[in-house]
Amino acid sequence: MGSGGREHALGWKLAQSPKVDQVYFAPGNGGTQNNVDITVDDIEGLAKFAQDKNCITVVGPEVPLSNGIVDEFTKKGLRIFGPTKNAAQIESSKIWAKNFMKRNGILTARFDVFDDSKKAIEFANSVDYKLVVKADGLAAGKGVIVCNSSSEAIDAINKMLIQKDFGSAGSKIILEERIDGIEASFIAISDGNTVYPMATSQDHKRIYDDDKGPNTGGMGTYSPTPVIDTNTANEIQKNVIEKTITSLKKEGITFKGFLYAGIMLKDGKPYVLEFNARMGDPECQPIMMRMDSDLLEYIQASINGTLSSLPQISWKKQSAVCVVLASKGYPDSYKKDEEILGLDDATPNSQVFHSGTVRKDGKILTNGGRVLGVTATGETLENAITNAYARVDKISWPSKYCRTDIGKKGLTWYKSERI
Ligand code: AMP
């Protein structure tokens, strides 16, 4: 379920399982086959389709999870992969997630919650550290404003609490200490008791090279990332991921599905910036290309609560890099309906995962801000970068835009900071 690059990559990987007869995408995009014209908010329509086809449903995006699709499907006896509405709160309410971390001793930036703009502004003026202002609810990755000064924080508070730019998602806000460190993504799969790590990855959130400009949904990723070395990975697995699953269980919540921790590493300590109750996009694309195990087996084990009967997930030794091709103007306004050329000019070790595309009269047209995730593997990170950009160069449309430095953070880390 879903229409992004994440769903294309999940479907691509699932189609390789000898146990899968057919993959359907609802609603899918211009690059996916067997698209079913049912939107992700039509729970009844999706349930009927899953029942007719005897499908396992894999939920990509967060909104249907927070609408309770897993609860509804489970009531009907349908097999569905992902957390219940209650468990998905870890993403759908940032305030719930921050309080959960606080009461369970999971390391996160200090914070306060406000619904009154005067009190929030008073607080912003009183602290001697930089702030991040966050809308409580889901805001398509845009409800977080990282501020450089108290006046920027006050602007952000006004946007959320007075101007209501984020609607009801911003009627309560978090003012959180800004942590300046190195960011990486840590994703795991859980059946509510056992939780296995996926490969590590690092996103590039800002629109321009060298992490300049506004935040986006993600402009590229690579996996694995040297930023999370084995010791750090073990620490995150134990003190963040396993602690979260067991603390949720203690509170009566069984978390099944992908659990994503957005981590900021500072002074060697992993601070949780946020949790997502699903795979990341574009983290999913390189992770799927590196996964050796059969994804379906792990999805079935998550649904059935039998993950501990499977071995840890195995990964290709190679690196993988995903370069997001966007339409100029994203994350603000951009053109649509431009024809994309060069998609069939394949190179070894690369895959093009579609997101904002649509198929019309045999042509593939742009249909969103983030359009394609060009993903390639290589023996080293450097090779994977070269392979990904070689494929990127073969694809064109008038408004095509991408960052030119995806993966560079990993290379410089290898060369200079990795001691
Ligand atoms: P979130 O959706 O909470 O992960 O926030 C989106 C992005 O904002 C993160 O990926 C970070 O780049 C940035 N961010 C969030 N919280 C903080 C923080 N406390 N300190 C610094 N940057 C942050």
Image (spheres, helix red, strand yellow):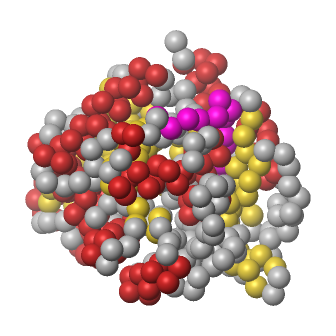
Circle count? 0
The one of 418 and 233 positioned closer to us in this rendering: 233
Q: Residue at x 25, y 59 (%)?
A: 87
Q: Is residue 274 above or below residue 167?
A: above
**Residue reaching furthest to the top:** 419
Res. 235 image quadrant: top left
| Residue 314 lies in quadrant | top right
Spot occupied by residue 156 in the image (x, y as percentages of width and height): 31, 61
- Determine the residue positioned at 35% across, 55% down: 304
Inspect the magenta stretch and tell me whether residue 315 lies in it: yes
Is 305 magenta? The answer is: no
Residue 359 x, y percent position in the rendering: 74, 80
- In the rendered image, residue 152, in percent from the top left (x then y), is placed at 33, 54
Where is residue 40 shown, x and y percent of the image?
A: 45, 78
Q: Nearer the viewer, residue 311 or 105?
A: 311
Q: Is residue 356 visible?
A: no
In this rendering, is residue 277 above or below 170? above
* In the image, residue 246 above or below residue 3: above
Q: Residue at x 49, y 75 (%)?
A: 54
Tell me: 385 left or right of 216.
right
Q: Is residue 143 above or below residue 389?
A: below
Nearest the viewer among 209 and 300 is: 300
Left or right, residue 397 beside residue 11: right
Of 242 and 402, which appears nearest the observer? Answer: 242
Horizontal side, residue 65 vs residue 10: left or right: left
Chain part drawn in magenta: 312-323
Q: Residue at x 71, y 70 (%)?
A: 31
Residue 59 seen by the camera: yes
